[in-house]
Each structure stands twice: as structure tokens, then as C-alpha cells.
Image (cartoon, coloured by chain):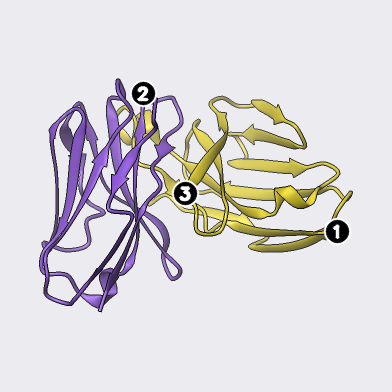
């Protein structure tokens, strides 16, 4: 059974600081996704990471994937209040489960609060 | 494209009643997924379809839950009879293929009294 663990689950930080959210998963996969969810809203896709060593950046957010370590990171640079949200990583076992796409297994989410 | 469309956005019903949630995926997407989000269990996959065919329904909690996809532009998730523990936000998502991200609809917030 695929397990996805995020840490920390709660993070309060000040504007201008840097921080990293970690996502570990338990079985082989080369498909990892990061989503953002604002309170009462749906999930917004941030990054798609499909190979070992993949790195994607958008604004103050950067995501990376190490498939050998089964680890992805979401790095926040010089945080601003607008980045306050819950961030989820999700893993798709894809071909390793014997099929094409598979449903996503989500971490519990990291609730991020950025204070002015 | 309007994105994934779900209806209703909110549903309040009484225990024992039948509930039907609806989803219209993004045009051209081959995969459709149903998820449920609760505080206790987080986001869980219920079932997904590829080209209108159910592929994996192992996440459907009980026989009270059923899902159909009669054509490429419409899917339903039905709960009959509903119970208070079914209260959750139900999301529908679609993706173009097996390597693209899934796009989520706005969700249906279900409350079973």
C-alpha cells in the first residue's frame, strides 16, 4: 500500500523567510504532484514532477523530486502572505501499479500560515 | 474551457435519502476521478474511469456508493441510502492522460443530517 507522508503538517512563518516542505512516499513511483488548496476551495495544480532529478520553479516556489530517496521537496523563498494555504503532495504509482494513470494518493497536507 | 464542473455545490439531506452528485470533465480528457475529503481521513480516491470505463473502485467505501460514466462528458456518484458519516466534500477531477496533472472541480459539500 502506497503511503505518502508530509512534514511538517503545520507551519507558521514570517514574511521574507525561506522554508522547505518535505514529502516522502513508500513505494516506487516517478509521478509526483504538488497542489495548493485555499480554505473552502478546490485544489490547484502547482507542479508536475515526472522524473528523477526533476526541478520546477514558479515564482517563490520550487519543487524537486528524488525518486531514489522517494522524496520530494517544496521550497518557499522569501515567503509572502499570499502563499498562505494548505499544500498537498500526491503520488501516482502509474505504470508501477500495472496500469496507465492511477488515482492519486495524497499526503495529509501542510497548513502554511505566513505572517506579515 | 470552463474547467471541471460539478453540481450541486452544496447538498444537505437527511439520513436514508438518496444523493446524486454530478460531474462534467474537461473536454478531451480521458480520465475522470472521484475523491472525497474529510478532516479525519484527508483526500481519498473513491473510483476512477478511463475512456468511460471504471478502472479501480477499490476506494468506494461501501455498496451504498455507486458511480457511472455513461458518456465522455458526464459522470455521477450516487449514495443510497446516505448516512451522516458520508458528510464530506466530494471532488471530481479529470486529466488528459496518464502523465498530466489532474484538474479538480469546485467540489460538492455534502451534509447528511
Q: Is residue A101 left or right of residue A26?
A: left
Subunit ID for the residue under disc 1: A
Q: Are marks 3 and 2 on the same chain?
A: no
Measure the alpha-carbon separation of dots 3 and 2: 19 Å
Q: Report crowding for label 3: few under 14, some 14 to 19, many 20 or more residues within 10 A (C-alpha).
A: some
Q: Report crowding for label 1: few under 14, some 14 to 19, many 20 or more residues within 10 A (C-alpha).
A: few
Residue B63 placement (x, y as % from top left): 11, 61
The chain letter of the purple chain reads B
What residue sits 22% from the left and 46% below the top?
A: B22
* Circle 3 or circle 2, nearest the eye: 3
Disc 1 is placed on an element classified as: loop
Subunit ID for the residue under disc 2: B
Drawn colour of chain A?
Answer: yellow
Q: Is residue A94 left or right of residue B56?
A: right
Disc 2 is placed on an element classified as: loop
Judging by the rendered image, the residue that carries numbered circle 3 is A42
Disc 3 is placed on an element classified as: loop
Nearer to the camera, A28 or A51: A51
What residue sits 85% from the left and 58% below the top?
A: A116
Measure the alpha-carbon separation of dots 2 and 1: 39 Å
Nearer to the camera, B57 or B72: B72
What residue sits 31% from the left and 27% below the top?
A: A100
Judging by the rendered image, the residue that carries numbered circle 1 is A116
Subunit ID for the residue under disc 3: A
Judging by the rendered image, the residue that carries numbered circle 2 is B96
Amino acid at each position: 500500500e502506497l503511503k505518502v507522508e508530509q512534514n511538517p503538517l503545520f507551519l507558521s512563518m514570517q514574511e521574507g523567510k525561506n522554508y522547505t516542505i518535505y514529502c516522502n512516499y513508500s513505494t516506487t513511483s516517478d509521478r509526483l504532484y504538488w497542489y495548493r488548496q485555499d480554505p473552502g476551495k478546490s485544489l490547484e495544480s502547482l507542479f508536475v514532477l515526472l522524473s528523477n532529478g526533476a526541478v520546477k520553479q514558479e515564482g517563490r516556489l520550487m519543487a524537486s523530486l528524488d525518486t531514489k530517496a522517494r522524496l520530494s521537496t517544496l521550497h518557499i523563498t522569501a515567503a509572502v502572505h499570499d502563499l498562505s494555504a494548505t499544500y498537498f503532495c500526491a503520488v501516482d504509482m502509474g505504470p508501477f501499479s500495472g496500469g496507465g494513470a492511477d488515482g492519486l494518493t495524497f499526503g495529509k497536507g501542510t497548513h502554511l500560515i505566513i505572517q506579515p | 474551457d470552463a474547467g471541471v464542473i460539478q453540481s450541486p455545490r452544496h447538498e444537505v439531506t437527511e439520513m436514508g435519502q438518496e444523493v446524486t452528485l454530478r460531474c462534467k470533465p474537461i473536454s478531451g480528457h480521458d480520465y475522470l476521478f472521484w475523491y472525497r475529503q474529510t478532516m479525519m481521513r484527508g483526500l481519498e480516491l473513491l473510483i476512477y474511469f478511463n475512456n468511460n470505463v471504471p478502472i479501480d473502485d477499490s476506494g468506494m467505501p461501501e455498496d451504498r456508493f455507486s458511480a457511472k460514466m455513461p458518456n465522455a462528458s458526464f459522470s455521477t456518484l450516487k449514495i443510497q441510502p446516505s448516512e451522516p458519516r458520508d458528510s464530506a466534500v466530494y471532488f471530481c477531477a479529470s486529466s488528459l492522460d496518464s502523465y498530466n496533472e489532474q484538474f479538480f472541480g469546485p467540489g460538492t459539500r455534502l451534509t447528511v443530517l
